[in-house]
Image (tube, helix red, strand yellow):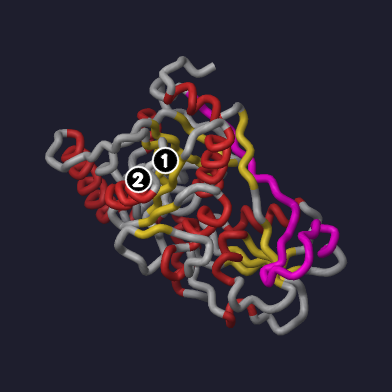
Amino acid sequence: MDIRLGLEKTLSRAWRRRGPLAVALLPATALFASAAALRRSCYRLGIFETVALPVPVVVVGNVTAGGSGKTPLVLYLARQLAARGRKPGIVSRGYGGRARAPREVTADCSPGLVGDEPLLLARRAGCPVWIGRDRVAAARALLAAHPECDLLLSDDGLQHYRLARTIEIAVVDRRGLGNGWLLPSGPLREPARRLARVDAIVFNGAQPVAAGEGVPARFRMTLAGSRFQSLDGSGPACGPEAFRDRPVHAVAGIGDPQRFFQRLRALGLQPIEHPFPDHHPFTPEDLRFGDDLPILMTEKDGVKCAPFAPGGAWMLPVEAQLQPDLARWLLEKLDGRAPA
């Protein structure tokens, strides 16, 4: 087993309850909590600079470690806002990529350079996407290159306090807040009470959690998709019925691989599960299973595996669906009207 995957599985199990391993990590958690609280206080008191941009900034993030569905939500918002007359741009750290300085992400970029999620967004969002370790610098570079943009979406930017934000949206997935402890004893990047200060919470297959009186809006998100696309671009997309006659290899290097495997089972398929760590740098060896069974994977993994995937490899794009209408709520809030 991959060492990183083994560590992720061990921590994931530990984060479900306040057991022996979680308790043993409490001294490290105390250090993390102190450092995080000090950092937040420095921004709140003005000791660290917060930079405001000339356009509204909408942050999409979470308070837990790992993926929770932020990228599909950013994709949804970019498309919905553009359809309603706005001109959004997207900024991201570019996690998993080698690039450090701000740069634009285009459809032909290497995922090893810019990261898998920014590349996926660049190919599907229909708006400018820029990355950079310094998100303020990336945002300024985007606006300089694309002055028509009138709104920025910050992907996974909840803890990037240097970039001033107009609206904060937090995503909570089906794993919830785990045992409720901060890293590394639990999955939380910030205390659970942080959710009381965001503008909206989006529940991605999760049950609502108590967040106090400070949250005026809550939304439910589902990920829909049942048409598979070939990684080599040959032939049209196909439905799940094309794979129901035999088992399939299911590959997922996302924050919650079981979410993908369960989706395949819900489509009537028989997945042989191959979980990998989130943002895993796939190699050809990872897809060599010694048989001719189809290989199905997430779109996020597909953008990395396409250059070397064998024939018979497919990815499953998904679209976020929100109830009630998050884009409408967001525009009303930006326009200063009371959301309906």
Quarter containing the C terminus = top right
**Residue type at mark 1?**
Cys
Q: Position of residue 125 (x, y in %)?
A: 55, 48
Q: Residue at x 49, y 32 (%)?
A: 209
**Left or right: 231, with 32 as reference point:** right
**Left or right: 340, with 36 as reference point:** right
Measured in 3D between alpha carbons, the distance from the residue under mark 2 to the one under mark 1, in whole angstroms, is 7 Å
Can residue 273 be found in the magenta stretch?
A: no
Residue 180 to residue 200: above or below: below
Question: Which residue bears the numbered disc 1?
Answer: 149
Q: Position of residue 213 (x, y in %)?
A: 40, 20
Which stretch is magenta? 217-243
Residue 46 to residue 267: above or below: above
Q: Do the residues under discs 2 and 1 have CB atoms within 8 angstroms? A: yes
Can residue 249 be seen here? The reply is: no
Residue 15 to residue 285: above or below: above
In depth, the one of 176 and 76 nearer the eye is 76
**Left or right: 236, with 310 as reference point:** right
Question: Which residue bears the numbered disc 2?
Answer: 143
Q: Residues within 10 Å of mark 2 (few under 14, many from 20)?
A: many
